[in-house]
Image (cartoon, rainbow, N blue to C red):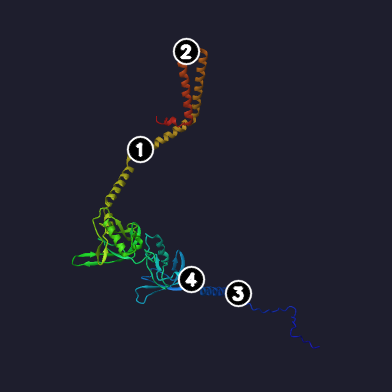
Amino acid sequence: MNETSAPNDHRRTAPGRATEHHSWWPGWIWAVPVAAIAIGAWLLVRFLTQGGTDITITFPNVYGIDPSSSNIEYRGLTVGSVTDVELSKDGNTVKVSASMNDSAKRFLTSETIFWLRGANPSLSDLSSLGAVLSGPTIVMEPGRGKAATSFTGQTHKPIAPPGSGAPVLFAVAFDGDVGGLTPGDPVKLRGFPVGEVKTIGFHYNAQTDRVATPVTLALYPSLFHLETAKKPRSPEALKAAIGQLISKGLRANLDRDPPLIGSYRVSFEMVPGAPAATLDVAQNLPQIPTAPGGGLASIVTRVNKIPLDQIGQNVLDLTKQIDQLAASPKLKESISQLDESLTEIDKTVKAVGPKVDQLVQTLRNTAQQLDQASAAASKTMGGAASQTGLNDTMREVKEAARSIRSLADYLERHPESLISGKPGQ
């Protein structure tokens, strides 16, 4: 018989022989790399679909900006990240490339401002101290205007918000050292910012042997909130207001916030009894007079007036007197006598303490006996007591019994009075 099977017949295997099965799945060991590839592809697709807007921000210095960690924030939210930092072609500035989220794209206009929080950490702005460890953060302040992708960044928070208009320049000539005053430092009037330092000059006149350090201030009319009939934000309105304030004693002063250790700033102060002055013109700019003795030199002068030597000598004298008192034999003798007195008091209290109850009970018995004797005498004598003058005697006996009973009550409440006596005695 011809034993041939149809093409679709299954072949039987001999007993005890393993059967081989072939599958398309290479094995569980490939699950991890396959999952990693899938996740990477998903992230790539997500990045490409989300998109983003590339911008460039020009800063005068890198100030620690790091493409791996520096972000761009708006109202505390991260709206972009730094992708690259490079020098400009002329080498005078730094170009920061960043990618902005789609949510911030509509804020990228010609008047939008980018500034660095923490470029110059200062005690006057505690939030900037975090940049010492993490580096500065780029902060965005949206403004109006047309769409833009190139911006000029600032190293400090702008004094005036976007759209405040152009500032008006004024000149100030401080008599003393301007110290570490830098462009961008605030100008304040009664604690409110009204402008910022624009430039700081340094000139030496060999003929007069005089050193001048002119400072240019940029004041914003919008920050003065002028109440005038016409054009309150115009330069003319601001100059007229400054001139009127100067006639009433307005002067410029240089100080630090916090004092001595904080950042520098220019403050406008109303000086009582200031000599008459006007808004003069110097170097084609209206010049604001300064307060007498203003500048950092006045701070140093006031510090130098503190009698540190005398204070130090007084401290040394007081320390010496304390040492002499501590080493005095009389003090040691007094302490020894006090210790002995306390020891004797302790012994007395221990000796008298157990007998206080007995004494109190004895006093109560005595008072009771006096009451009984008085009552018996009154009953025995009857009306004859008044005739013989014994009423006064009986009365005194009763008062004595009452006093003894009061003494017993007091000793029961204050047994320590046997040693110290009654208060005020």
In front: 343, or 165? 165
Please state which amino acid type lies under the numbered disc 4. Answer: Asp
Q: Residue furthest right?
A: 1
Q: Are marks 4 and 3 in contact (CB under 8 Å)?
A: no
**Which numbered marker is on residue 386?**
2
Q: Nearer the viewer, mark 4 or mark 3?
A: 4
Q: Alpha-carbon neighbours of circle 3 within 10 Å: few (<14), some, or many (≥20)?
A: few
Question: Toward which corner of the image does residue 70 lie, by quadrant?
Answer: bottom left
User: What residue is pinned by disc 1?
Assistant: 334
Which comes before the other along the chain, label 4 or label 1? Answer: 4
Looking at the image, which residue is at 49% across and 11% down? Answer: 384
* Quarter of the figure with the N terminus: bottom right
Q: Nearer the viewer, mark 4 or mark 2?
A: 4
**Which numbered marker is on residue 29?**
3
Q: What is the C-alpha distance between the residues marked 2 and 1?
A: 62 Å
Q: Are marks 1 and 3 in contact (CB under 8 Å)?
A: no
* Quarter of the figure with the C terminus: top left
Please state which amino acid type lies under the numbered disc 3. Answer: Ile
In front: 342, or 296? 296
| Residue 349 placement (x, y as % from top left) | 45, 33
The number of numbered badges drawn on the structure is: 4
Which comes before the other along the chain, label 4 or label 3? Answer: 3
Q: Alpha-carbon neighbours of circle 1 within 10 Å: few (<14), some, or many (≥20)?
A: few
SS type, badge 4: helix
Residue 363, placed above or below residue 188: above
Q: Are marks 2 and 1 in contact (CB under 8 Å)?
A: no
User: What residue is pinned by disc 4?
Assistant: 102
| Residue 95 placement (x, y as % from top left) | 39, 73
SS type, badge 2: helix
